[in-house]
């Protein structure tokens, strides 16, 4: 069980579900930076997070940790096997190397528009949040009445 192999399996799962990292991580309940680090083989993942991913996506923990496809939806298995073969081809047979090409995998114009919209929404939310924090920090403390 290498981090790179787990990352490739997560990447294949995300590709099969046709979701960007930010959406799948939100759906699963993980911070996006955790998903990204694990998918790229840079970080280990706790069994709690692995269980959350399995529950949210319908994969088995055997798939996640060992690459076994038992007790999974047959249609999902077929799609995952196909995606993993594509990843292996990109990797030259080495796990964990396909991530370098992943950003260029989005060719669909509709997906690019959705991602751009999502980025704009996140920017707006962050700006609003910063303003709220700034307002709280600059707000003078209330005087206590006696």
Image (cartoon, rainbow, N blue to C red):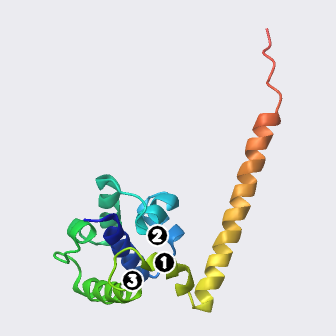
Label 1 CA crowd tier, 10 Å (few <14, some 14–19, many 20+): some
For marks 2 and 3, the one nearer the N-term is 2
Residue depicted at x 36% and y 57%: 44
Name the residue tied to disc 3: 91
Residue 70: x percent and y percent?
A: 16, 76
Q: Image height check: is 96 above or below 93?
A: above
Mark sitting on residue 108: none
User: Could you tell me how far apart the alpha carbons at marks 1 and 3 are, in whole angstroms?
Assistant: 21 Å
Label 3 CA crowd tier, 10 Å (few <14, some 14–19, many 20+): some
Residue depicted at x 29% and y 54%: 47
Name the residue tied to disc 1: 19
Name the residue tied to disc 2: 24
Of the residues tagged 2 and 3, which is closer to the observer? 3
Instruction: Quadrant for residue 69, please give it.
Output: bottom left
Instruction: Quadrant for residue 108, please give it.
Output: bottom right
Which one is nearer the viewer's eye here, 79 or 67? 67
Disc 2 + disc 1, Cβ < 8 Å:
yes
Callout 1: SS: loop
Callout 3: SS: helix
Of the residues tagged 1 and 3, which is closer to the observer? 3
Which one is nearer the viewer's eye here, 84 or 73? 84
Pick the quarter of the image with the N terminus.
bottom left
Callout 2: SS: helix
Which one is nearer the viewer's eye here, 40 or 123? 40
């Amino acid at each position: 069980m290498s981090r790179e192999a787990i990352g490739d399996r997560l990447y294949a799962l995300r590709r099969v579900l046709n979701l960007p990292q930010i959406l799948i991580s939100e759906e699963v309940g993980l911070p996006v930076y955790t998903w990204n680090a694990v998918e790229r083989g840079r970080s280990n993942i706790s069994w709690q997070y692995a269980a959350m991913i399995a529950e949210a996506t319908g994969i088995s923990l055997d798939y996640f940790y060992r690459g076994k496809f038992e007790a999974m939806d047959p249609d999902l298995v077929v799609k995952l096997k196909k995606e993993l073969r594509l990843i292996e081809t990109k990797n030259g047979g080495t796990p964990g190397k396909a991530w370098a090409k992943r950003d260029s995998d989005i060719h669909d114009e509709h997906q690019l528009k959705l991602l751009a919209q999502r980025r704009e929404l996140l920017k707006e939310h962050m700006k609003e949040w910063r303003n709220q924090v700034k307002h709280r920090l600059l707000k003078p403390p209330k005087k206590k009445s006696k």
